[in-house]
Amino acid sequence: MITTITTTGMTAPPPGTESGLLRLAQILSPAFPVGGFAYSHGMEWVIREGDIHDAESLAAWLAEVLEHGAGRNDAILIAATLALPDDADDAAFDTLGDLARALAASPERDGESMAMGAALGATLAGMRAAGEMPEEHMPAPPPLPWPVALGRAARGLGLPPRLVCALALQAFASNLVTIAVRFVPLGQTEGQRVLAGLAPLIQRLAEEAAQADPGGLGGAAFRGDLAAQLHETMQPRIFRT
């Protein structure tokens, strides 16, 4: 059953965060060149096998991946990166990066995370070199897995961790919905209904991640992990994961 989005219980972001929100929205936009569109997170194999065949099955699949798979883990890693002290050195970020890589269920998943993290750092570095991005607002991270790179880049934006996590989860789900719209296929309106129905779950996961620590990492999205592994040898295929 696809739920409908409501505004009950939603809270407004703190005042003065508009600039930070715009910066974060920019790097989570499909227009920002981290290559997220090239990755289906194993969903290309899932669609071929018929596990995802309509809006309802898509909603159920995404809910599982968000709550029990990479979605929740990425949110916890983002929040943990934001929570590091101001004087944290590279080793502290590398430790979280190692955790992120250890959680990758397949080489492709690991490559996806590392490639997107590296692209984020390279793009921000290029913008800063051109005078478009003050370093104190969004420093360019060295090559790190995607959730840690995103968390490190967002540390200077003055945004609550729950908000950063929520927008990151929304961007993750939105990319997968777009893939399903094209390849299941689904109508555009059906796809947006699925995404809207996931909003309460995304909000809850973001709130939980903001209060969690790396000790809470883990998952049980076994079918999703299997899909990622089987996708590696799928032929023909369009997506990198």
Image (tube, rainbow, N blue to C red):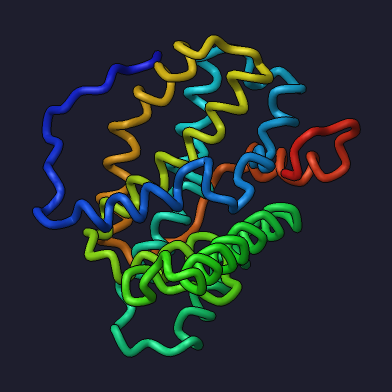
Q: Residue at x 56, y 27 (%)?
A: 178
Residue 142 pos. (x, y %): 56, 76
The residue closer to the viewer here, 203 or 67, is: 203
Q: Tell me: residue 241, above or below residue 77.
A: above
State which quarter of the image contains the C terminus: top right
The reply, left or right, for residue 183 in relation to residue 94 is right
**What count of labels does the image hold?**
0
The reply, left or right, for residue 200 in relation to residue 237 is left
Residue 23 pos. (x, y %): 35, 55
Q: Where is residue 5, by image quadrant?
A: top left
Residue 76 pos. (x, y %): 39, 59
The residue closer to the viewer here, 200 or 141, is: 141
The reply to whether residue 214 is in sight is no
Q: Residue at x 68, y 53 (%)?
A: 109
Q: Tell me: residue 85, above or below residue 177.
A: below
The residue closer to the viewer here, 216 or 56, is: 56
Q: Tell me: residue 201, above or below residue 121.
A: above
Q: Residue at x 30, y 71 (%)?
A: 156
The reply to whether residue 164 is in sight is yes
- Outermost residue toward the front? 130
The reply, left or right, for residue 11 in relation to residue 61 is left
- Outermost residue toward the left? 15
Q: Where is residue 11, by image quadrant?
A: top left
Residue 200 pos. (x, y %): 28, 32
The reply, left or right, for residue 99 in relation to residue 12 is right
Q: Where is residue 179, by image quadrant?
A: top right
Q: Residue at x 35, y 45 (%)?
A: 167
Q: Tell me: residue 210, above or below residue 175.
A: below
State which quarter of the image contains the N terminus: top left
